[in-house]
Amino acid sequence: MELKNPIKQIRKKLRNNPTPQETILWSRLKNNQLGFKFRRQHSFGKYIVDFYCKEKKLIIELDGWQHKEEFSGENEKIRAEFLERKGLKVLRFWNNEINNNLAGVVFEIKKYF
């Protein structure tokens, strides 16, 4: 069976299998707790972002060791330029920041509101 929209299937899989840090941060972002609606695993073209606030054009990405190479070098530069051309701001946090300083992460996110 051919998938009609493979990106949509990937997004669904990512939403159904979040990392522990995504679950923790989502508990602070969902239900407009910060005053704005966030979406999980939102796509822009071929790229999927962890969290997106449409009203503020703000993307929040959580990075762990598995992203170290993916988000370095030429691939990340191309991805960042693509998102910036859409007028989006990307905030990036390491998983250990979620684990050790969730209040500080939320504070940083609120700076963009």
Image: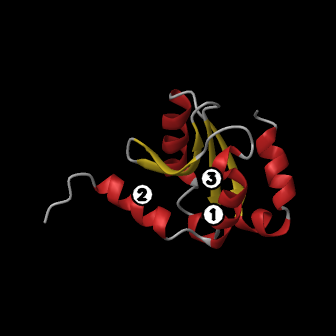
Q: In this view, does 1 lie to the left or right of 76?
A: left
**Which sits earlier in the primary sequence, circle 3 or circle 1?**
1
Kind of residue sitting beneath label 1: Glu
Quadrant that contains the C terminus = top right
- Please determine whether, in this image, residue 56 is positioned above or below residue 59: above
Q: Quadrant of the N terminus?
A: bottom left
- 59 lies above or below 98: above
The answer to whether marks 3 and 1 mark residues whose Cβ atoms lie closer than 8 Å is no
Q: Position of 111 compared to 14: left or right?
A: right
Which mark is first along the chain, 1 or 2? 2
x then y, percent, for residue 20: 64, 72
Left/right of residue 106 with respect to residue 73 in the rendered view? right
- Badge 3 is on which residue? 61
In the rendered structure, which amino acid carries the disc numbered 3? Glu
Residue neighbourhood size for the residue with mark 3, other residues' Cα within 10 Å, grouped as few (<14), some (14–19), many (≥20): some
Density class for disc 2 (Cα within 10 Å; few <14, some 14-19, many ≥20) is: some
Depth check, front residue: 70 or 2: 2
Question: Label 1 near label 2: C-beta < 8 Å?
Answer: no
**For residue 11, which numbered disc appears in the image?**
2
Query: Picture quarter containing residue 19?
Result: bottom right
Residue found at x 64% / y 52%: 30
* Callout 3: SS: strand
The residue beneath circle 1 is 22
- Pick whichever, 46 or 51, lies toward us: 51
